[in-house]
Image (spheres, grey):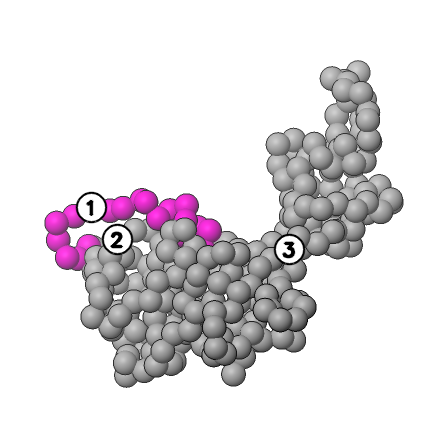
Amino acid sequence: MCYNFINHTEVCFLTNLINQIKLNGNNYMHSNNSQCDEPFSLTIINQQFKLQQLTTTDFKLTGEQIIEKTGKLQPEEYILLHIQQDGMLEEINLRELVDISTNDHSFYLFKNDRTFNLELNGRRYPWGSNTINKQALQMIGNIPENHNLWLEKRSEADIEINGDICVNLDDSGLEKIYSKQSSVKIIINGKTKTVDSSELSFSELVELAFPNQPTNPNTAYTITYKRGCDCSPEGSLVKGESVCIKDGGVFNVTATDKS
């Protein structure tokens, strides 16, 4: 069965959660005891991509203990995948100890008796279901919204993975998937611009709005936008910031003379 209950907002939230794991993964709390008065937080993501937040005062838990904390009575019927600091996934066996004394730990939990494998942009991932869809691939691979996903085929044309396609991981051989950036059309000051990027900086937007404009220290720019990515659908930018972009995004860039 291919699960498609996750939406773009959830993809964004879960991707940010995984990125937070990467940022905070080295912030360890040191102690010689097996427990701590301050609880540690665990996030469990099930195969419908619903979140369950858990807390524990134990520094280390086995895979079986983590599964039991979710309320599952038969841990042997489940697959537990640990999201690593580099975004990779590691299967945790029932008796394997996990050091959870870092700030953030998240796991995927599947009801299954085996794992499957796939390759995404040259990196090999285990997965707890025999199918995987576009939204899940975007999340585990941290794929930008304006990148298309393609299934590599050996004797025919590669297949684009859209919202209706589930990749069968139970076929013979390793399924290889790659992402490819697509052109994005945005509107800047009423004019359509085509760019090949998943995000634009403040200075890049100014250049698109006012191409080849000579630098003038007395000119100040303000930027507002709407119809942006799900993580930031509207707002404003200041110098030094960047914003995710997608098709149909609208930007207003205004130049003001400070003199």
Residue beneath the point at 42% across and 73% down:
116
Question: How would you rate the neighbour count of disc 3 (Cα within 10 Å): few for under 14, some for 14-19, many for 20 or more?
Answer: few
Is the residue under label 2 in contact with that under label 1 (CB below 8 Å)?
yes
Find disc 1 in the rendering and name its residue: 30
Mark whose residue sits in front, 2 or 3: 3
- The span from disc 3 to disc 1 (Cα, nearest Å) is 42 Å
Q: Is residue 246 above or below residue 208?
A: below
Find disc 2 in the rendering and name its residue: 101
Element type where label 3 sits in the image: strand
Residue beneath the point at 66% across and 37% down:
201
Query: Is 19 a magenta residue?
Result: yes
- Numbered badge on residue 180: 3
Element type where label 1 sits in the image: loop
**Segment tinted magenta in the rendering:** 18-36
Answer with left or right where residue 103 lies relative to residue 4.
Answer: left
- Across and down, in percent, residue 151 comes to 60, 67
**Amino acid type shown at disc 3:** Lys
Q: Is residue 171 above or below residue 55?
A: below
- The span from disc 1 to disc 2 (Cα, nearest Å) is 8 Å
Q: In terms of depth relative to the viewer, which is nearer, 115 or 76?
A: 115
Is the residue under label 3 in contact with that under label 2 (CB below 8 Å)?
no
**Amino acid type shown at disc 2:** Ser
Residue beneath the point at 64% across and 55% down:
180
**Amino acid type shown at disc 1:** His
Quarter of the image for the C terminus: give it: top right
Residue beneath the point at 87% across and 44% down:
191
Q: In terms of depth relative to the viewer, which is nearer, 180 or 231?
A: 180
Element type where label 2 sits in the image: loop
